[in-house]
Amino acid sequence: MPQGAVHPSSQIIHAAARIQQDQLLRRRLITAAALGRAEFETSPYVEEQIYASFIPNGDKSRMNAFHSAPWQDRVSIVAALEDARLRYHGYRLIYERHPELLDERLRDFFYQHDRTKLLDTSDKLKWNSLPMAYAAIDAVRAGCTDQQSSIVDEYRHYLERRIAAEG
């Protein structure tokens, strides 16, 4: 550091002391920060809400315990989570790996939730749905040779059989 230069930490301490002492400056800084911060609408999709706010401190240790616990112990860990977003994701992981560990109500919730998303016909989805997959298959098929069309048709039939099996 050059001779006569002020150390950056002392400048920060001086600025903090000035802000602490000047109530009007504090209010102006808070107002400026609030005006500069973009307001985001909370997404209705829990998958997009995960970064909307901080995770409660108690849930951080529960998350670590969840990832190291045997599957059969994870249900009670998830039930103890304070944050609803984390509970959703915890139960979702259990549903995808070991649905038999969840009660019927939770299994039905995730089954219906997935089915609704899969069959959604809305124009502005943030995920791929079966109708969108069919439209994409039809678009690809339009430029295919007979051999390629056969492969594309088989994929479409696979999707139809899979959804019928779950229905």
Image (cartoon, rainbow, N blue to C red):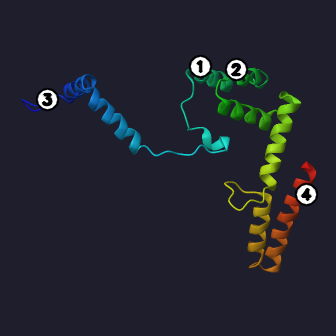
Q: Name the residue tied to disc 3.
A: 6
Q: Which amino acid, by three-letter code, is at mark 1?
A: Gly
Q: Judging from the image, what secondary structure is the residue with disc 4 in?
A: helix
Identify the residue at horizontal 36%, vertical 34% (top origin). 30
Q: Judging from the image, what secondary structure is the residue with disc 2 in?
A: loop
From mark 4 to mark 2, how far is it between C-alphas?
A: 39 Å
Q: Name the residue tied to disc 4.
A: 161
Q: Name the residue tied to disc 1.
A: 58
Q: Are marks 3 and 2 in contact (CB under 8 Å)?
A: no
Locate residue 128: give its quadrant.
bottom right
Question: Residue 155 placed where, x, y %?
Answer: 83, 64
How crowded pointer 2 is (Cα within 10 Å; few <14, some 14-19, many 20+) is rated as few
Locate residue 35: give its quadrant.
top left
The first of marks 3 and 1 along the sequence is: 3
Q: Are marks 3 and 4 in contact (CB under 8 Å)?
A: no
The first of marks 1 and 4 along the sequence is: 1
Question: Residue 112 placed where, x, y %?
Answer: 84, 44
Residue 108, above or below 21: below
Where the N terminus falls, by quadrant?
top left
Q: Which amino acid, by three-letter code, is at mark 4?
A: Arg
